[in-house]
Amino acid sequence: MIVGVDGSPSSLHAVEVAAQEARLRGAPLRIVHAFGQPPGRLPTGVPPWHPADHGLEPMVHGTLVRAEERAHEVAPGIEIDRSVVAGDAFEVLEVESRSASLAVVGSRGLGGFAGLLLGSTAVHLAAHGTCPLLVVRGRPDPLGAVVLAVDGSGAGEAAVGYAFAEAALRAAPLVAVHVWNTWNERAYEGPGDPLPTMVVDTDHLREAEQRVLDETVARWQPTYPQVTVERRLLRARTRPALIEASRHAQLLVTGARGRGGFTGLLLGSVSQALLHHAHCPVTVVRESRK
């Protein structure tokens, strides 16, 4: 698994969480520092850009040393590999995610605007990364259940399996939350698609959404019989309801996209809202690419 670090307090906290996750999984941890953007494409035969060439190696080394020290403090004995890669953090972590089981980043880095709630690297990696992404945010040392945002979509099935596995790994209960309202019957797919007609038969819709929740849990419960599952069917606005559900959770798991939104978007509005406002760490699980 990998963790991105830039020396910011948020990224150092992410290192601590990543170290705990590595210990929990018995996995090695790779600390990755993406340093700067190389000045254009280098001609063939020119050595790759390196911080030592610019007299910045001591600063980069210090960042990685502090990160490794933090990791060993919270998880003594884990295997750690450090890497400095020249390039944009977006591209570096996206490439690193191709061979990782989990990527961990903080909610804010050193860059960006002071008023932003979430760093652009986290958003980009949630949309384009290959492995699940854990964004460290919310309460320090969160406890409680693992919360799964159920949307009933095929793209969200990977998140369901991941949430069950996380609950089993943490010996924690799983709360499967499915939020519905009268806009659930159709997804608004694009500018040429007419707005959905308001559903009058709410009892029929509620029963249909209950089946979505029940069937989602039923597909995975036999694989993880040790996991205690609480099913919550909520008639509410999706984003506020899931944010509230995260208030007493240790982890919230969501797919990158659900049934709603515009076709072709890599990261849905609900996932983005959770990454910005959840009260606990959020893991975004993308549909597997074949």
Image (tube, rainbow, N blue to C red):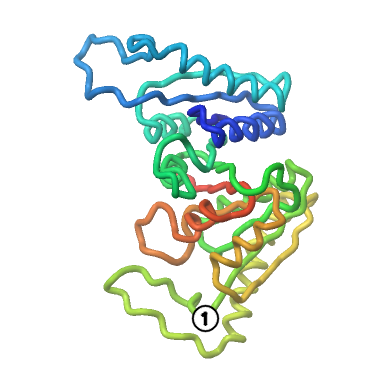
Furthest residue toward front? 114
Q: Residue at x 55, y 64 (%)?
A: 152
Residue 140 in the image, given as x and y percentages of width and height: 68, 43
Residue 245 in the image, given as x and y percentages of width and height: 66, 61
Which is more toward the observer, 123 or 289? 123
- Which image quarter: residue 246? bottom right
Which is more toward the observer, 279 or 268? 279
Q: Residue at x 40, y 32 (%)?
A: 89
Crowd class of label 1 (few under 14; some 14 to 19; many from 20; radius 10 Å)? some
Q: Residue at x 40, y 80 (%)?
A: 196
Which is more toward the observer, 57 or 153? 57
- Which image quarter: residue 78? top right
- Which image quarter: residue 169? top right
Tag count: 1
Q: Is residue 131 visible?
A: yes
Check disc 1 and give the amino acid type. Thr
Q: Which residue is mark 1?
A: 182
Q: Residue at x 52, y 21 (%)?
A: 63
Q: Give the answer, above or below, for where 22 lies relative to 255.
A: above
Q: Give the answer, above or below, for where 104 lies relative to 78.
A: below
Q: Quadrant of the N terminus?
A: top right
Which is more toward the observer, 171 or 250? 250
Residue 9 in the image, given as x and y percentages of width and height: 56, 33
Q: Quadrant of the C terminus?
A: top left
Furthest residue toward left? 43
* Secondary structure at numbered mark 1: loop
Q: Is residue 290 visible?
A: no
Residue 116 in the image, given as x and y percentages of width and height: 44, 49
